Image (tube, helix red, strand yellow):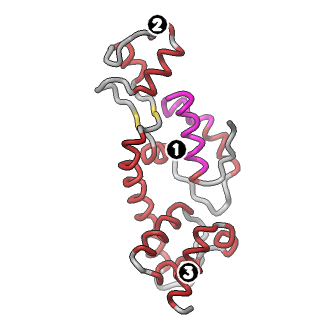
Amino acid sequence: MSWLITDETSAIEWIRQQLLNKPQTRQDLHPNFMKEIQHIAKHEILPELDALLEQNFLIYEGKEEVPSQIHGYLSSNYKDLRGLQKTDSKLKEKAKNRWYVPDPNKQADLERLREKSLLREFDSYKTEIEGNKKKLKQFRTEAIRTGFKKAWSEKDYEAIVNIGERLPEKVLQEDDKLLMYFDNAQIRLGV
């Protein structure tokens, strides 16, 4: 399946599809990733591939037994690795430094890490606009979405409105989630 990478969400999904098909190293992923990010939106700041991998995926470091996803891929595609146990040193060596899609049971931990990083980014936008009237020219849409969600849960409607007013009108109008938070926050504040 072919993905058009236009923002952080689509980049993560593209990486997920690549790793589901073939757990691979950063060096394997990087050239194709660079080709795919040509359609990124002008306002969008896309994190580096390393950051996307760290925040959303897992790497096999060669210490414990080989994860099922990597084991399945290697034993299917390399004749000399077929029938080996997940603890076999030859299999571990071939699996080392490959990124893979996390087990859904561990996904919650990764999501918390990613959310923390996005909230730090959102806080930097709040700091950036303090005391001036400048629009945000470049930002991570995912960070804005995550920040709006947290601000809403904390009833910090003012933060949503302040940031929302600094976003390009087109971005706000084209993103249903951002627009919903912004409009509702304005209603709550009586703006």
**Camera-nearest residue between 191 and 169:** 191
In contact (CB < 8 Å): disc 2 and disc 3: no
Compared with residue 4, is residue 162 higher up or lower down, i.e. above or below? Answer: below
Secondary structure under tag 1 reads helix
Separation of marks 2 and 3 at Cα, in angstroms = 60 Å
Q: Is residue 123 left or right of residue 182?
A: left
Mark 2 residue element? helix
Between 114 and 177, the one lying in front of the other is: 177
**Few, some or many C-alpha atoms within 10 Å of disc 1 (few <14, some 14-19, many ≥20)?**
some
Mark 1 vs mark 2: give the one in front: 2
Q: Residue at x 70, y 71 (%)?
A: 170
Front residue of this view, candidates 73 and 54: 73
Q: Residue at x 33, y 14 (%)?
A: 88
Mark earlier in primary sequence (2, 3): 2
- Determine whether label 1 and label 2 are within 8 Å by CB: no
Amino acid type for the residue under numbered disc 3: Asn
Magenta segment includes 22: yes
Q: Amino acid at mark 2?
A: Asp
Chain part drawn in magenta: 10-32
Is residue 144 positioned above or below 22 on the image? below
Q: Nearer the viewer, residue 144 or 187?
A: 187
- As displayed, is residue 146 above or below residue 81? below
Q: In the rendered structure, which disc, 1 or 2, sits on the residue that comes first in sequence?
A: 1
Amino acid type, residue under disc 1 in the picture: Leu
Numbered circle sitting on residue 80: 2
* Image position, residue 69 (x, y; %): 45, 27
Looking at the rendered structure, which numbered label has been put on residue 49?
Answer: 1
C-alpha gap between disc 3 and disc 1 = 35 Å
The disc placed on residue 184 is 3
Identify the main secondary structure in magenta: helix
